[in-house]
Image: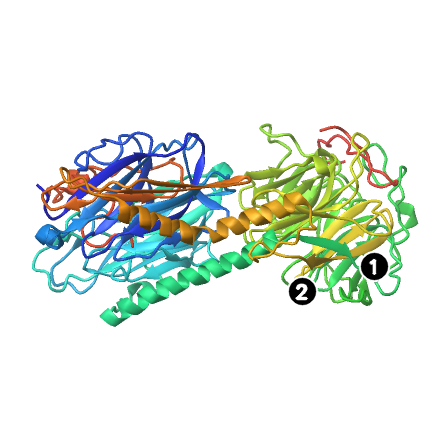
Amino acid sequence: MFQSDTYLCTAFPVPTSRDAYIVDFIPHASMDTVHHMLLFGCQTPVSTSSYCVQGTCADEASIMYAWARNAPPTKLPKDVGFKVGRNSGMSHFVLQIHYGDISAFRDHHRDCSGLTLRMTSKPQPFIAGIYLLMSVDTVILPGKKVTNADIACDYTSYPIYPFAFRTHTHHLGKVVSGYRIRDGKWSLIGRQSPQLPQAFYPANKEVNVKYGDTIAARCLFTGEGRTSKTYIGGTSDDEMCNFYIMYYMDSKHAIPYMNCMESGSKELFQHIPAEANVPIAVSPGHMNSMMHMVHSTENMLLLDTNRAEQVLDQDYHLEQVSAWPQSSLQLGQVSGLTLDSDSNLVIFHRGDHHWGADSFNSQARYQQRSIGPIQQSTILVVDPAKGNILKASGRDMFYLPHGITTDKNNNYWVTDVALHQVLKVSSDGRDRMLLALGEAFIPGSDNNHFCQPTDVAVDTETGNIFVSDGYCNARILKFSADGKYLSEWGSSDRRRIPFRIPHSLVFLPDRQEVCVADRENGRIQCFIAKTGEFVKEIKKEEFGGEVFALTYSPAGDGLIFAVNGESPYRSAPLRGFVIDYSTMDILDTFNPEKKEFKMPHDIVETSDGSVFVGDAGSKSVFKFTTEKMETFVQTKVRPEHNMSKTAAIQEKQTVAQQPQPQEENEEEKKSAAKPNKEWGVLPAIITTLLLIPLLVVISIGVFICWRKNSKAMGMLFLLPGKAVGSLNLGNFFASRKGYSRQGFDQLSTEGSDQERNDEDSSDSENEEYSALPPLQSSS
C-alpha cells in the first residue's frame, strides 16, 4: 500500500563495462510530490524491486548525489568526475526517492521523478567524492528556543578540495554550518538555511582539508511549536542534521565517500564562530529569489570554469623576447632565479667563480676556499620589463651559489654548495645574514649538516622551509621558519626509487604540496608538504632523462614550468616545458630563437605570464612571453595549426555545445513514451553517444512513474564516481531508541522533510659533477 513516508528504490547497472566518470547531475522532480532523492553507487544492490525495505545496497553504498526542495542541477568542475564502472567497485546505481506526503497523489496523480547523469569515458585527473557529517543522537526538547547538533571528526587521509556543500534538516532546522579546523582556527566551508532549496552551493574555495585537520558542523534547531521531543529519524515529524561536502582529490588517492557521525565536544565547539548560532530567516519571497540566485550562481560558476579552461586549453606558445634585456647584465654562471615581493626578477649568479672538475675532493670538501668569496654582487634585482638592474647585493658572501627563493617578508633563502649551507639573507642591500643552517665548508648527512644543498622552497602559510639536499645526499628536509629541524624524506624510503640529485624545489600554495625536480632520474615528484607523503610523478620521454628545474603557477588547474638538461645516455633537445599539473600533459615546449640553451639551470614565471630561464652554461637569462591563439570556446578554429591541437579544440567545442540539444532530445523521447497501463509504469531509457575523437559522453535517463496505489518511481543518470570507504545506513536508525517507525529502516541518510536539493649521469660544461655516495656523518 502506497502511503506517506514511503521510500521507493530502483537499481540500474552502469551502462558500460569500462571505467566512466559522471560529470553532471540533472534532477527531474518537484518538492510538491517528492521529499528527496538519493543516488547511491555500489557493486550489489539489495533488490531490483521498488520498495527499499531491506536498504539500498547489499555491500557498501557510496552516496553520490542528493536532491530536495527544488534544488537546481549540480555541475562538477573541469577535470573532476565521479568514477564508476570496471575498476571503481561500483557497477550499479540505486536511486531512492522519498515520498513524504502522498496528498499530491490524489485524483490519480502520477509522478515521473528522476535524475539525469552525464558521463564521459575520458579519465578525469581528479575524482569527486562526498563527505557527510551527520548527527545521530540529537534530541530537540519541545518549546526550547535553541538546540544545537554538533558533529566533528579528525581528518586522517589525503588532501581533499571542497568545491560544493549542501545542508539538510527538516522543518525545525534554522541554519547549518560546516568548518575546517586547523591549528585552532575555524575556516568556513559553507553555511546555509536548510529551508532554502537544498542544492549544492559553491564552497569556500580558499579552504582545503588535509591530514591532521578537524572537520566540524553545527545544525541549529528550534523546538518552538512542538509539544513533544523530536528525535533524529526518517519521517516528516522527525528531524535530521546533515552537512554534505562535495570534494575532489587526486585520482591516485581517490576515496569516493567518507562520513563523520561523532558528536563534537563542548570544549571544541566553545570556539565555533558566532555566525553558526545566527538563524537565517527565510521568507517566501526569499525562497523565490534564492532559486533565481542559485541558477545565476550556477551560470557564474560555468563562466568561471570557462575562464579557467581558457587558461589551460588555449593553443598558445611561449616565444623568446629577443630584445630583453635591453642592456648587458654582465653575469657569471646563473644558478638561481626568483621573484621578490614587488614581482621583480631576482638573479643569483656566481660572478667569476666556476664549478669545475677540481672544485671538490672525493669527500665533497671545497678545494678553492683560498681564493675567497665572490667579490661581485651575486644577487641582482632586475626590472622584468626592460632588464635593467634595480638593486645589487651579495658581495663577499658566497663561494658557489646555487638556489634562491624569497619568503613573505622578502628575505632571500639561498644555498651555497661550497659552504654546504642554507642561508637566510636580508634583501635591504646591507647583506645581513639572518640565519645559517649547516656548518660552513663541512659536508654531512645528519640533521645539522648538508652536502651540497641545491634549493629552498618556502611554505607561504606557515613559513616552514624545505631544502633539497642535494648532490651527495638524496633527501628533502623540512625546517620551521626559525630553522628548527622538523622532518625529512627520501633518503630512507625504500618503497620508492631514491632521488638522484634533487635539484630544484617549488611550493604549491593552492595545493599545499612541494614538487621537486629529481634531476638524474629525469622526473618531477610532488609530495604533501605537511607529511612528505607522495602525491604524483611526472616523467616524460621528452625530458631526455634529466630535469633541472621547475616552477609552478596556479592558473587554471595548475601549470608546472620546467627545463631539462643534457644527458650522456639520451639525446633530447634542451628546452622548457609547460605541463598541466592535473593531466600531466605537456601543453607547450619552448627554447630561444637565436641563441640555444647550453645549461638551463632555473626557471621562474611572473604574474603576467612571462617566463624567465637562467642558463649557467651561457651565463645569461632568457625571457619568454605567450602569444595567444584561438581558444576552444570560440566558434572558429584556425586550420593552420597542427592537426592534433585542432582536433582537440574541435572536440572540446563539440562537447561544450552539445548538452543543450541533447537534453532537448531527451525531453522529446520522454514525451513520446507511452505508459504501461497494467503497471502504471513509464520507463524511458535514453542513451546518447557523442562519438568524438578521444572522448565519449554518455547520457542516461531512467524514469519509473508512480501512481497512488500502484508501483512507480523515477531516475536519471550521467556518469561519475567510485565506491570506497562508504557507509550503508539502511537499518542504522531503526536500531536506535525511538526510531522504529514504519518505513524508516528504508532510509539511508535523509528523512522526511527536504533532502539535498634511471642511469648515472654527470654534468656538462664543467658544472655540478655527479653525486657522491651519502656521507654517514659529518667530518
Residue 47 vertical placement versus 36 (above, below): above
Q: Amino acid at mark 2?
A: Ser
Callout 1: helix, strand or loop? loop
Viewer can see residue 280: no
Q: Is residue 655 left or right of residue 44?
A: right
- Camera-nearest label, 1 or 2: 1
Viewer can see residue 457: yes
Q: Which residue is mark 2?
A: 341
Q: Amino acid at mark 1?
A: Ser
Query: Looking at the figure, which quarter contains the C terminus?
Result: top right
Disc with the residue nearer the chain's start (1 vs 2): 1
Q: Is residue 384 left or right of residue 479?
A: right
Mark-to-mark CA distance, 1 and 2: 26 Å
Query: Looking at the figure, which quarter contains the N terminus?
Result: top left
Q: Position of residue 331 (x, y in %)?
A: 87, 56
Numbered marks: total: 2
Q: Residue at x 81, y 34 (%)?
A: 762
Image quadrant where residue 713 sits:
top left
Query: For this rendering, which residue is in front, 10 or 174?
Result: 10
Q: Is residue 493 left or right of residue 744?
A: right
Q: Which residue is mark 1?
A: 322
